[in-house]
Image (cartoon, rainbow, N blue to C red):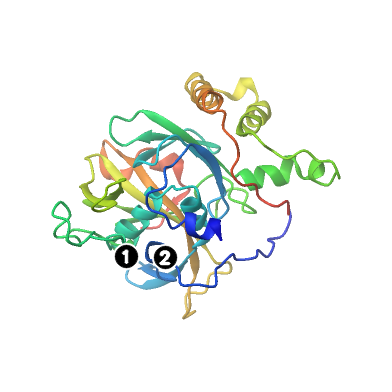
């Protein structure tokens, strides 16, 4: 019941957290609950920029479920499989898959920027998708 | 690739709070025929997750840009800064461009081929603020911005079907192409095909 009433509270303060939105298949990490502009970097990453001033305030990792199904499904079958508790691990894995040769300088900088944001705020995943 | 799985829809026994109780469907121009209309479902689950994290801004944008209404929160229609609260708001059916294929994976869809993007140019939107009078403030959309709404269309597509033909998954502001301010920047590479 605490969850049911807390989500309807208009005064509760937003704290940075990574949230997986299943309909959009996006893991979003935003520092502030403010209007933002989405700037697509590539098929995996979108930066969230504060509408006022275009300061980067977060990022979105797209296709997380699709990526998970392709690369982590086997691990999910183990009894002692490890849950993803930090978003940084996902970013690191995405970078490994793409490979350094495919990164253009500006794209690498965007991933490093997203990595820095997650590390600074010690991002923790708010919710995880169930493995298919 | 795994087949789509059934999901348990989380609900509650009591009445939903007004700003989470948005309509089940929204009308839009048909992706295949700009002169016709169709209906899409509005998923509530992601909004519930956002609300649980006290993340309200995407919900305020859903109300004020997709549905064309001020978020139903106390005093939103009477607070001086917002009056007239509904004037100038647009809805999804007023999208001026539509693309198919978002060139990125979305769940079981490896390349987003079955996702369409509606492009809108709203003049106003509502911002969430921790304000004692009204938590929804009407603002002018800055120049150079558009709003993209993404819809997963049902497969197979049935133009004759009387019910809904897809589900609105998410949306957000994007930067406009400086050379064509009614289209998103990099629209040619961002989307597979322009429908209209």
Q: In this image, B84 relative to A123: left or right? A: left
The residue where tag 1 is placed is B93
Residue B107 visible (yes or no): yes
Q: Quadrant of residue A71?
A: top right
- Residue B174: image location, x then y, percent: 35, 42
* Residue at point 40%, 72% (across, down): B38
Nearer the N terminus, badge 2 or badge 1? 2
* Residue at point 81%, 41% (across, down): A81
- Residue A99: image location, x then y, percent: 65, 24
Q: Chain of mark 2?
A: B
Above-or-below relation of A96 to A71: above
Instruction: Locate the C terminus of chain B and report the quarter of the image it occupies.
Output: bottom left
The residue where tag 2 is placed is B17
**Label at residue B36:** none
Above-or-below relation of A98 to A81: above
Mark 1 lies on a secondary structure that is helix
Q: In this image, B91 relative to B140: left or right? A: right
- Residue B29: image location, x then y, percent: 35, 67
* Residue at point 48%, 59% (across, down): A5
Q: Chain of mark 1?
A: B
Q: In this image, B68 relative to B104: left or right? A: left
Of residue A111 and residue B79, the one placed in the foreground of this image is: B79
């Amino acid at each position: 019941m605490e969850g049911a009433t807390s989500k309807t509270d208009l005064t509760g303060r937003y704290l940075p957290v990574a949230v997986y939105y299943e309909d959009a298949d996006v893991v979003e990490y935003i520092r502030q609950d403010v209007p933002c502009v989405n700037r697509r970097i590539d098929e995996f990453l979108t930066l969230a920029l504060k509408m006022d001033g275009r300061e980067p305030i977060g990022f979105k990792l797209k296709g997380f479920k699709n990526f998970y199904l392709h690369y982590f499904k086997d691990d999910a079958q183990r009894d002692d499989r490890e849950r993803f508790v930090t978003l940084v691990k996902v970013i690191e894995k995405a970078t490994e898959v793409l490979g350094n040769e495919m990164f253009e300088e500006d794209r690498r900088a965007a991933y490093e920027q997203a990595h820095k944001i997650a590390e600074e705020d010690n991002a923790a995943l708010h919710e995880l998708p169930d493995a298919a | 690739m795994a087949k789509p799985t059934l999901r348990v829809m989380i609900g509650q026994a009591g009445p939903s709070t007004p700003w989470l109780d948005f309509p089940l469907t929204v009308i839009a121009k048909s992706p295949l025929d700009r002169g016709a209309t169709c209906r899409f479902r509005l998923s509530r689950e992601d909004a519930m997750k956002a609300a649980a994290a006290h993340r309200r801004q995407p919900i305020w944008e859903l109300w004020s840009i997709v549905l064309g209404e001020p978020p139903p929160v106390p005093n939103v229609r009477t607070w001086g800064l917002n009056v007239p609260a509904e004037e100038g708001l647009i809805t999804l059916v007023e999208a001026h461009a539509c693309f198919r294929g978002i060139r990125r994976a979305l769940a079981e869809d490896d390349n987003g081929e079955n996702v369409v993007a509606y492009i809108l140019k709203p003049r106003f939107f509502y911002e969430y603020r921790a304000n004692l009078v009204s938590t929804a403030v009407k603002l002018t959309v800055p120049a150079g911005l558009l709003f993209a709404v993404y819809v997963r269309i049902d497969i197979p597509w049935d133009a004759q079907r009387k019910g809904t033909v897809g589900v609105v998954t998410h949306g957000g502001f994007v930067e406009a192409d400086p050379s064509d301010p009614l289209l998103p920047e990099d629209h040619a590479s961002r989307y597979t095909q322009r429908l209209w």
